[in-house]
Image (tube, rainbow, N blue to C red):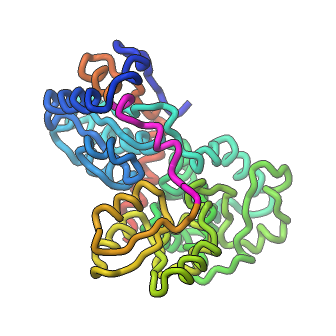
Amino acid sequence: MSVVTQSEGLHPLKPYKSLENEVLQARIEAVRREFGDRLLILGHHYQQDEVIAHCDLRGDSYQLSQMAAESESCEAIVFCGVHFMAETADLLANRPDKMAARNGVRVPVVLPDMAAGCSMADMAAINQVEAAWEDMGEVIDTSEVIPVTYINSAASLKAFCGRHGGIVCTSSNAAAVLEWAFERGRRVFFFPDQHLGRNTALKMGIGVDQMPVWDPYQLELGGNTEAFLQNSKVILWKGHCSVHQMFRPEHVAQFRQQHPGIKILVHPECPREVNDLADVSGSTGKIIKTVEESPPGTKWAIGTELHLVNRLKQEHPEQEIHFLSPVVCMCATMYRIDLAHLCWSLENLRDGHPVNVIEVEPEVTKWALIALERMLAVR
């Protein structure tokens, strides 16, 4: 196991579920006041508004982890996000130099609900990736393959990349990371999100005929021929984000027809067929910045998680903002973190019995940090 979790607390969760929101909100704020700047509550952009209201910092997963790690006063982190995000926070906040500066004292990273996972991250298990690496080594030279994992992945996969000369990427630096990889190898093995890998590689001039998709449930070479793999430039993992997978080309056509002059703004985790039709494609940070910098009266149909789109709509009434899909599409695992879980985890932390502490094992930490440090060095 790459992670140690602790879930036994002084206060059981069940009674919290029956409390009114106003009571939970008051108790959450009481803990925040008691801790002061010794506590950081991190809230990912996809969280519910009622949870975001109690967060000290709001951002994407890597940005939040970086900000928390840079705090000199922080003694505990509660991450309102999903499992891999809490792992990344632990990696950065408790890396060797930080630990040494604190005389070996760890900053505990708490995930309010252990069921808050990520379906995309779960589509690539470390044993599957290791098996794929071994299998593809039968037909291509893996010493010339650079593994690249999206930040939305388990710490064990980041460590795999660290051990094999690879690197981590985010949706905002994926192109720069792929360029870095091609300076060091003939091929890239990109996981777990096929869409981000494909959309990024296409913009670099790599054709789909050089991008086989590795399906871990296909026994023979991930469902590929030897010739396809030998001709490859980017080997994509068959994984996707369940939220961004929902957006379709017909949704784009419908909005363009019904709202003349509307612009389409999507995340590169969307399928190619949607990404190619968009006016702007970019990371969560780029989506937010694009809206913030647009003049009043601009019309947008945005293809990303529902809570974020609704928040942008509320914060920018001077613009016309729509959710790109007619189907309600939110991050269901992120949605699991509610006020009850947040209050429960905070009060257990306050009373000295932290629950759901995410702690990445030392050997995994060592190699995962190497892959992350390579990413930070990319310009």
Provide residue 15's location: percent of width, then percent of height.
39, 17
Q: Is residue 328 above or below residue 182?
A: above
Apparent side of residue 373 relative to residue 24 in the rendered image (left or right)? right
Q: Which residues are magenta?
A: 327-342
Could you tell me residue 193's position as x and y percent? 60, 59
Report whether 251 appears left or right of 311.
Answer: right
Q: Quadrant of the N terminus?
A: top right
What's the residue at 48%, 77% (across, down)?
A: 264
- Taking depth in this image into account, of 347 and 313 the one nearest to the observer is 313
Residue at the spot 59% in from the left edge and 77% down from the top edge: 254
Task: Please tell me which residue is depicted at 72% across the width and 51% down the height of the picture.
Answer: 132
Q: Among all residues in the image, which is located at the extreme front?
A: 258
Residue at 47% x, 57% y is 305
Count up the numbered dots: 0
Position above or below: 43 against 238: above
Residue 127 location, quadrant = top right
State the image coordinates of residue 294 (x, y, percent, origin top left): 31, 79
The answer to whether residue 367 shows anywhere in this view is: yes
Quadrant location, the C terminus:
bottom left
Extreme residue in the bottom direction: 261
In magenta stretch: residue 332? yes
Viewer-proximal residue among 37 and 99 = 37
229 relative position to 71: left or right: right
Q: Nearer the viewer, residue 102 or 346?
A: 346
Q: Quadrant of residue 204?
A: bottom right
Q: Position of residue 216 (x, y in %)?
A: 75, 50
| The stretch drawn in magenta includes residue 376 | no
Residue 165 makes an appearance in the image: no
